[in-house]
Amino acid sequence: MTTARLIQGNEACAEGALAAGCRFFAGYPITPSTEVAEMMAARLPRLGGKFIQMEDEIASMAAIIGASLTGHKVMTATSGPGFSLKQENIGFASMCEVPCVIVNVQRSGPSTGGPTTAGQGDIMQARWGTHGDHPIVAFAPYSVQDSFDLTVTAFNCAEDLRVPVVILLDEVIGHMRERVELPETASVTVVDRRRPDPALVSLEEYLPYDNSADPVPLMADFGSGYRYHVTGLNHNQKGMPTGNPAQIDQLVRRLNNKMELAAQRWQVYEELMTEDADVLVVATGGPVRAARSAVRQARADGVKAGMLIIQTVWPFPGARLAQLAARAKRIIVPELNLGQLVLEVERHVCTPAGKVPVTSLSRIDGELFTPNQILDAIKGVS
């Protein structure tokens, strides 16, 4: 059973979080993400959850890390400037393997930029915003329905891999209203973190950062009887700081090996008429709508155009893109920045016959692409 509703992308994101089992939200109001916090403030207490408005984005990120360590599914929401403030604690969550979900409703920038205008300038920041090598998964919805579905996926991925997961909405998706089908909560597939069983793992034997063959250790809740140390320093399997080069190497490599699992288990993308496409459009988030319309019009005009819609931005679906590039003659990447996604596209489009030409199509004025702008690029109109 499903319920049809007319809601915003931000509201759909909050609905997805609740359906996935989120019961703690900490955040600070910032346009254009505030509706996420407003809805969580209204809904969480009715479900036995907790909402807290923190003094800033740094504290918001710290709060959800602490709540996650006690066993709760957690989320925060922000936009560009706030996302920048969260980076140090996102790195801490990565190092300490704390599952959490961070919603970033992107706006134009840099700095304060345009609070009510769309942008996609945070794609690279989502992956490389913190220092060091670390695992990060990021999803980018392109519709209101997608906002619900990918938020559920984000929570499941975070719990499965013990990683921070970013949801890269953009202003137009966050504030757009569409008809969506919300499933009954009981029918939503929910993944929970794997916890140690006291009958199988004694308090003394438990290794919170076990460097075994499985890159994702069991995670005990604080207060459940298992005691362990949490630190952003290089640490051993017990969580205690270490300067041992072998232990450090093993830890960081294991953390980053989670990205391989993410690519296997949580890679999401869609394709449109790619079977014989000479011109391939690659897009994510807000530009998808105009690009999809342009591809269909190009087909109607006799141009063999196709499209790869990227919903899992990190890890990037490079293997599939490479397969599509092997038979494409040109690739076009429309995005609301000066070319961030296109850099990753270019890395993966070398074929035995050479590198496929890639055209970057950018807008940074806070406005959206029109289908005709992308159609002109498909047809090679300068």
Image: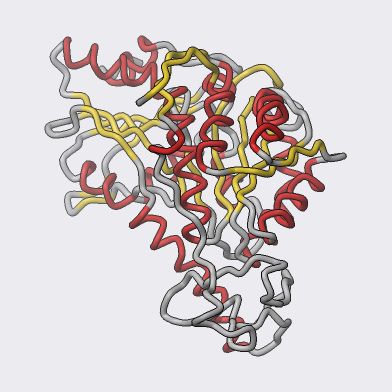
Q: Nearer the viewer, residue 98 or 341?
A: 98
Residue beneath the point at 22% across and 15% down: 298
Q: Indicate the quadrant where residue 42 lies.
A: top right
Q: Is residue 312 above or below residue 222?
A: above
Numbered label tally: 0
User: Residue 154, position in %: x, y?
Assistant: 49, 45
Q: Nearer the viewer, residue 3 or 380?
A: 3
Q: Is residue 6 left or right of residue 364?
A: left
User: Residue 370, position in %: x, y?
Assistant: 42, 11
Q: Indicate the quadrant where residue 303 lies.
A: top left
Residue at the extreme right of the image, as rendered: 55
The colouring scheme, among rainbow, by chain, secondary structure or one colour, is secondary structure
Q: Is residue 250 above or below residue 79?
A: below
Residue beneath the point at 72% across and 82% down: 240
Q: Is residue 237 above or below residue 165?
A: below
Residue beneath the point at 28% across and 19% down: 380
Q: Is residue 378 left or right of residue 45?
A: left
Image quadrant in which the C terminus is located? top left
Q: Is residue 178 above or below residue 50?
A: above
User: Residue 187, position in %: x, y?
Assistant: 38, 37
Image quadrant in which the N terminus is located? top left
Residue beneath the point at 32% across and 20% down: 292
User: Residue 377, position in %: x, y?
Assistant: 33, 19
Residue at the extreme front of the image, as rendered: 199
Q: Nearer the viewer, residue 313 or 198?
A: 198
Q: Nearer the viewer, residue 69 or 92?
A: 69
Q: Indicate the quadrant where residue 50 lies.
A: top right
Q: Is residue 323 left or right of residue 346?
A: left
